[in-house]
Each structure stands twice: as C-alpha cells, then as structure tokens.
Amino acid sequence: MAADEPQHGYITQIFVFLEQRNDTSFDFTQPYIRRSMRYVYPLFMFLYAAVGLVGFIGNVALLVVTGKRRLYQDQTYFFMGNLAFSDLIKCVIVLPISLANMLVQNWIFGSFLCFFLPMIQFFPIHASMLTFLMIAIDRYRLIVNPFKDRLPAGLCVIATWVGAICFVLPHAVYIKYIDLGALLGERFTGVGICYVNMEKHIEEYFRAMFVTLYALPLAIIGFLFVKISAELKSKETAPVIVHYNIRTSAQTPRGSTQAEDFGTKVTWANDTERRQLNGSVAGMDTPRRKEYPERATQDSDDDLDIAKEKTTQNYLIAMVTFFAMCWCPMYILILVHYFVHETEDNTGHMDVTFVTFAWFGYLSTCANPILFATWRLPSSTKDRLKGYFRFSNRRRSSSQLSRTEVSESFVVSATPSPRETRKLSTPKIKVVTNRNELSPYRDGILV
C-alpha cells in the first residue's frame, strides 16, 4: 500500500536530504500518494477495478463467441475481435499502470516505463479508432459498391497496429529521465524523475495527434455511415420485383395436365430499374431486368439482408459514438493541459480531473461487449429481457403483432441463388409491387 505524500512534497524531501547531508529517515524507494488524492484514492481504485474487471470478462467473452461460432469469417466480426483485443490490452496492462502513475507522486517504475508508458497509453486507443475506420470503409464497399471486393481483414488489422505504433513512437522524444540512484547513491536505487521536456513544444505533437487520429477519422466515419444509411434506406423503400420461374417438364403423359414447377425470386430494384419500371407502366411494356456480370461474389444486392444490415449499422454507430464520447474529454484535457500553467493552487484539481477523465475513457472497454451481446441475442430473448426490465408481462402492441403475422405469412419457397437464376433460360413473369405492402420492416422497428 502506498503511503501518503509527505507534508512538504516529495521534491522538497530530496532537497532536505541534500541540505542535511543524507541525515534523514525518509524512504525514497516507497510509493507516496499525491496529496490531492489522499482521501479519494480508495474510491478511484474501486472504480478502476470495476471497469477493468467488467471490460476483461466482457471482451474475453466476445472473443470466445467470435471464435466458437466462427463469426470471424465475416470481416465485420473480425474487426470486432480486433477491437476486443485492443480493449483487453487497455484493461490488463494500460489501466493499472496508468492508475498507479496518476496516484503516486514519486517515480519508482524505472527508465523503461518512463519512455514506454506514454506510448502504451495511447497506441491501443489509436488502434481502436483506426479499426472503426476500417469497419466504415469495408461496410461502405459492401453496401454502396457491392461488386467490389471487401477489404482483407487480416492485413487491415496488421496495418492498424503498425500505424498506431508508428504514430506514438515520436512521443519518446519529448520524455526525459533522471536516474537519482546514479547521482545520489544507494538510498535512491530504482528512483528517478520522469518528466516532459517542454522546450520541444510537445503541444504541437498532441494537436497533430488529435486531428490525425481522432477528429479526422471521426469525420470520415461519420460521412461513410451517412452514405451507408442513405443507401440502406433507398434499398428498403425500393419496389420489389417478384420473379416467377416456370419450368415445364420435357415429357408429359398423354391425357394428363402439363406439370409446372414454380420457383420464386425476390429482388430489390435499383435506380435504373426504377426508371425502367416507371416507363414500362406508362407504356404497358414488360420491364427489362439489369444483368450483372457473372462474378463469384456473395455481396450483391440480391444477397443483402436489408433488415440485418440496418441492425448492424445501428449497433456500429452506437459503438463509435460511445467510444468518441468516452475519450473526447481526455483528448481535450491533454490539449488544454499544456496551455494552462500548473501551479501549487490548481495542481490538486488537475490531478482529480485527469483521474476522472481517464476512468471515463476506459468505460469504452465495457461498452462494446455489452452492445455486442444485445446485438447477437435472439429476438425472443430481447423481448423477454424487456419484459423483465419493465417489471410486467405486457402483451405486444397490435402494430407489432400485425407485423409479426405479416412476416410469418409471407414465406417464399426455396429460392435459387443469383447465379443459378441467371443461368436459367426459361421465361420469367415479373410482378412489380411496392415493398411497403410486403415487408414487416417498413416502419423501422429495428433497434
């Protein structure tokens, strides 16, 4: 357990030691709590321990579920696993070391951590932000440009970590360490002074990091998510083309009715088809379907589950928003810290503010597993949990029941794949209707 900070400060005790010619009983190798944290540090230790424990359990469970159910085969879930790994590093390594550094006045962690600690504090945060950026780019290609190949998730994850490490390496240039053990003798073995060299203008470096790894990625992610949401909305409100494939048997016995095999295919019309459909209705002509190139892809418009993609989009937006909100106060405080001169009067307020904002930032490690769990829960389980939280067993509203009945009654028979449909040479009867008459997701009831 760390001791309270001495009455006249740790640095003052060093000068007293020098003036009295080593005649003092003060133990410099023991950790001493900052004076401003003397009465509140047990509370912060409890809060940090709670966040670290919940974040550790949640992210380990996220990785286990992703691996056990083989969700990593999808690029989005692979990136989610990378986010969980980054949060594990924060909970296991960064959080306890950062808390000790903010609570303890004297530096007893050695020269290596003096240079390495600032880098290890920031590079998992940068890796998470870059991973969110990769998710946004990948989903933009999936939804808006479905015939382009998706990003290679493994290479993107490696690129995010390499980029995050490269961005934090210059931080070591601004750090200085004084080994007191080598200067003042055995009483200071393992004790030193770790500080930031303000003459090299570290505030410019932090401004560049704020713009490059926080503000700019958030702006790009927001722009891409807006485009994705608009594209999903246009696909959801597009008219539905129901293709009935009629296949007649080659040999029919005399006197018997000709056997017919009906297969159905439901696709969403794009902008070109919509214009053709409008023209065909006016001229009473059959619309002509756009033929896509024969490419081995599973991400075409025909294969997109609009309801599922909307749900995924909503949860990803929630994750990015919560992450940005949690770390925004800490980023702003770091920028302001180098413009506000720390004095004897305000140093206590700065210490408490740093510990509080850092804890608020680490809350993001708990948010992703919770959102992921609600994302993957079955609908029946979600409804049951909502009933528990409301402390009643209310029946569903009539509108929700009607949507459920429509979704259960509208069952399409075995649908061939897009490639098999295009290979069929039999005639197709196209029935055009409005999706609002068929889809249970028209009113946007998804979370």
Image (tube, rainbow, N blue to C red):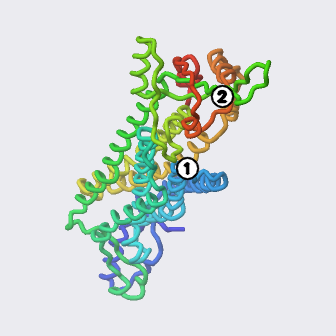
Above or below, 245 relative to 120: above
Residue 243, compared with residue 311, is above or below; it is above
Tell me the residue at 67%/30% (across/down): 383
- Per the image, the residue denoted by label 1 is 74
Q: Nearer the viewer, residue 201 or 294?
A: 294
The three-letter amino acid code for the residue at tag 2 is Arg
At mark 1, the secondary structure is loop
Q: Earlier in the sequence, mark 2 or mark 1?
A: 1
Q: Amino acid at mark 1?
A: Asp
Which image quadrant: the N terminus? bottom right
Judge whether 334 appears above or below 21 on screen: above
Is residue 73 something that shows in the picture?
yes
Residue that protrudes farthest toward the front in the picture: 254
For the point 34% across and 44% down, which residue is it?
220
Q: Nearer the viewer, residue 122 or 64?
A: 64
Q: Decide if residue 204 is on the left or right side of residue 349.
A: left
The residue lying at 42 percent from left, 57 percent from top is: 127
Across and down, in percent, residue 86 comes to: 49, 58
Kindly indicate the quadrant of the structure image that contains residue 274: top left
Instruction: Give the mark count.
Output: 2
For label 2, the crowd category at 10 Å Cα-Cα, with few meaning under 14, some 14 to 19 and many 20 or more, is some
Mark whose residue sits in front, 2 or 1: 2
Residue name at image x 31 percent, y 66 percent: 171
Task: Report, in whole angstroms, how far the alpha carbon at label 2 lies from the one at label 1.
Answer: 36 Å
- Residue 207, relative to residue 306: is it above or below? below
Q: Is residue 390 visible?
A: no
User: Which residue carries the number 2 mark?
Assistant: 247
